[in-house]
Image (cartoon, rainbow, N blue to C red):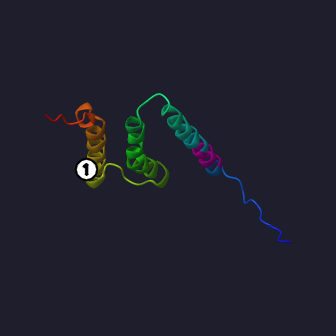
Amino acid sequence: MLRARGRLAARKPASAGLLVYMALLSAVAFGLWALLKHNRVGMVTVFNCLVPIFGVLLSALFLGETVLAWRNLIALALVCLGIWLVTSETAAAPARTG
């Protein structure tokens, strides 16, 4: 029989903060999933496009990276433009023929 003999290292406030962050992130994800009952799928799945924005903001917060570099601002602007294009009503309307 195989026995695991691992130990927990020193508990730090950063690890507790990370645990709370992951719990909140899971709660938000399940909340968005519950929104599918009341909204169109296309409107809810657009939140997937926000992953790069939150990735940049959280890397700046936790890793000390610069958010205001010109290439980051251009990338964030393009992601926001893409989200706007996908969620605009004219893009969602089907083309009429005839």
Q: Is residue 55 left or right of residue 98?
A: right
Q: Position of residue 85 (x, y in %)?
A: 25, 40
Q: Residue at x 38, y 38 (%)?
A: 42
Horizontally, residue 51 falls left or right of residue 98, namely: right
| Quadrant hosting residue 46 | top left
Q: Which residue occupies the foreground of this view, 82 or 41? A: 41
| Image coordinates for residue 34, horizontal then vertical, percent | 53, 33
Q: Three-letter amino acid code at disc 1?
A: Ile
Picture quadrant where residue 41 is located? top left
Vertical placement of residue 91 versus 53, above or below: above
Residue appearing at x 25%, y 50% in the figure: 74
The foreground one among 95 and 62 is 95
Tell me which segment is drawn in magenta.
16-22
Residue situated in front as seen by the camera: 86 or 96 = 96
Task: Determine which quarter of the picture holds residue 7.
Answer: bottom right
> In terms of secondary structure, what is the magenta stretch mainly?
helix
Residue 77: % across, % down: 27, 45
Image label count: 1
Q: Mark 1 highlights which residue?
A: 74
Q: What percent of the width, then of the height, locates residue 50?
A: 39, 44
53 w.r.t. 32: above or below? below
Quarter placement of the C terminus: top left
Classify residue 41 as left or right of residue 91: right
Instruction: Indicate the secondary structure of the residue bearing disc 1.
Output: helix
Direction bottom: furthest residue: 1
96 drawn magenta: no
Query: Can you name the residue that lies furthest to the front here?
Result: 98
Q: Is residue 28 found left or right of 47 in the rendered image?
A: right
